[in-house]
Image: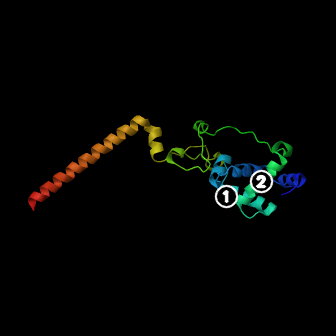
Amino acid sequence: MTDIAEGKAMLGSLTDKQVEVLDLLVMHRTTKEIARELAIAPNTVDQRIGAVRDKWGTVNRKDTARLYAQLVELCGKPLCDFSRVDAGPALPDEADQDLPVDPVFVLSDARPMERHPDWYGAPTIELAGLEAFDAKFGRAGRIVAVIVLALMMAVTLAATLSIADVLGRLI
């Protein structure tokens, strides 16, 4: 590897924005997750990682993250002044999540993407599909909707059978 002075120099060559991205990259976050957390475009995340790759001569994201983790461990975050205060979870339900080493995405993990105020004006949250229905009508609304849909299917089936019966008598 390298000595501490060389490690400090390599870490010192990074901008604060590149360090933010690399801290999340070391935690195995995807480009989209990093972009969402930092409220930047995914392309910007890739550009910052690419700039670090060019500085350090690494081949890919994995090697860049591995080298960054080794350098931080070698120098020690307090020694190199790269400490970062965690602001806590972005959403209240995130604090309770225990993610496995290789997380699997399931529908219950889905959450709406927040728009950045600079891109589209006022910050909004877009909900789609069942999340939008639940936000508007709640759990009771979903139960009522299921019952109504079941009744509509039953009426449709009864109408289809009666039409088939009438057509069968005509033939």
**Does residue 47 appear in this view?**
no
The amino acid marked with disc number 1 is Asn
Residue drawn at 13 percent across, 58 percent down: 167
- Left or right: residue 154 versus residue 48 is left
**Residue 55's x, y, as percent?**
81, 61
State which quarter of the image contains the N terminus.
Answer: bottom right
- Looking at the rendered structure, the secondary structure element under dot 2 is helix
Q: Disc 1 marks which residue?
A: 43
Amino acid at the residue labelled 2: Tyr
Q: Give neighbour class at mark 1: few <14, some 14-19, many 20+ (Cα, 10 Å).
A: few
What is the secondary structure assignment of the residue under circle 1? helix
Q: Quadrant of the C terminus?
A: bottom left
Residue drawn at the location 64% of the way across and 39% of the way down: 89
State the count of labels: 2
Q: Is residue 147 above or below residue 41?
A: above
Mark yes or no: residue 52 visible. yes
Rendering coords of residue 159 (x, y %): 20, 50
Front-most of 3 and 163?
3
In this figure, which colouring scheme has been used for the structure? rainbow
Determine the residue located farthest toward the right in the rendered image.
Answer: 5
Measuring from the top left, give residue 147's x and y in whole percent. 32, 40
Decide: few, some or many residues near mark 2? Use Cα within 10 Å; few <14, some 14-19, many ≥20: many
Q: Can you give x and y, in whole percent of width and height, for residue 17 in the image?
A: 76, 50
From the viewer's perspective, tell me whether residue 40 is left or right of residue 166: right
The alpha-carbon separation of the residues under discs 2 and 1 comes to: 21 Å
Q: Earlier in the sequence, mark 2 or mark 1?
A: 1
For the residue pair 8 and 144, the one nearer the viewer reads as 8
Q: Which residue is mark 2?
A: 68
170 left or right, relative to 120: left
Left or right of 146, for residue 62: right
